[in-house]
Amino acid sequence: MMKCPVDNTELQEIEYERATMVDQCQTCNGMWLNQWELQAIQANKGKNYAAELAKMPDLVNASHLNALNKNRELLDCPKCKDAGSQIEMDRREHGFCSQIMIDVCHDCQGIWLDKGEVQALEVFFERHHLDDKEIKTGFFQSLWFMLNK
């Protein structure tokens, strides 16, 4: 069973937005996403972020400040650790100008999102691509490109 890279609690598999199964820490509410789960969450459009879009700068700045204020060491990938490897994840800003920090494993392509970061990513994506139907896949293409550098 995978354990939370922040507090070592066993991750619980939960359903997030219409049948996308993710692993979540019940203590810190962080979330482990396998390679394509973030794309599945975004594709489902299970939540309406109209209210959050109006206050989007506060959400993004809160997420960014939260990430910057963390003086923690890099996290070990819970999936790789569960498989017997000790792989440190990189902590970096998602995409261009999102101000949302994510932890990424170069080995398995998984992503660790701290509490609120998945929602901040969804709001960021919807706000920046709301009117441009052709760019909707750009979020995931940029994520895929970033993970495969």
Image: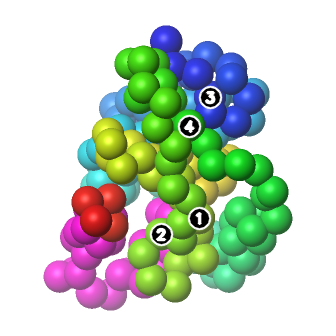
Q: Earlier in the sequence, mark 3 or mark 2?
A: 3
Q: Is residue 122 above or below residue 110?
A: below
Give the CA separation, mark 3 to mark 2. Answer: 21 Å
Q: Tell me the residue that label 2 is attached to.
A: 94
Q: Quadrant of residue 50?
A: bottom right
Cβ–Cβ under 8 Å for marks 1 and 2: yes
Q: Please state which of the two labelled residues, at mark 3 or mark 4, is closer to the viewer.
A: 4
- Report crowding for label 4: few under 14, some 14 to 19, many 20 or more residues within 10 A (C-alpha): many
Horizontal relation, residue 103 to residue 126: left or right: right
The image shows residue 17 at horizontal and vertical percentages of: 42, 41
What residue do we see at 77% from left, 63% from top? Answer: 66
Q: Which residues are magenta?
A: 119-145
Q: Residue furthest left?
A: 134
**Residue 130: in magenta span:** yes
**Residue 69: in magenta span:** no
Q: Please state which of the two labelled residues, at mark 1 or mark 4, is closer to the viewer.
A: 4
What residue do we see at 56% from left, 49% from top? Answer: 113
What's the residue type where badge 3 is placed? Cys
Q: 147 or 142: which is nearer to us?
A: 147
The image shows residue 116 at horizontal and vertical percentages of: 65, 53
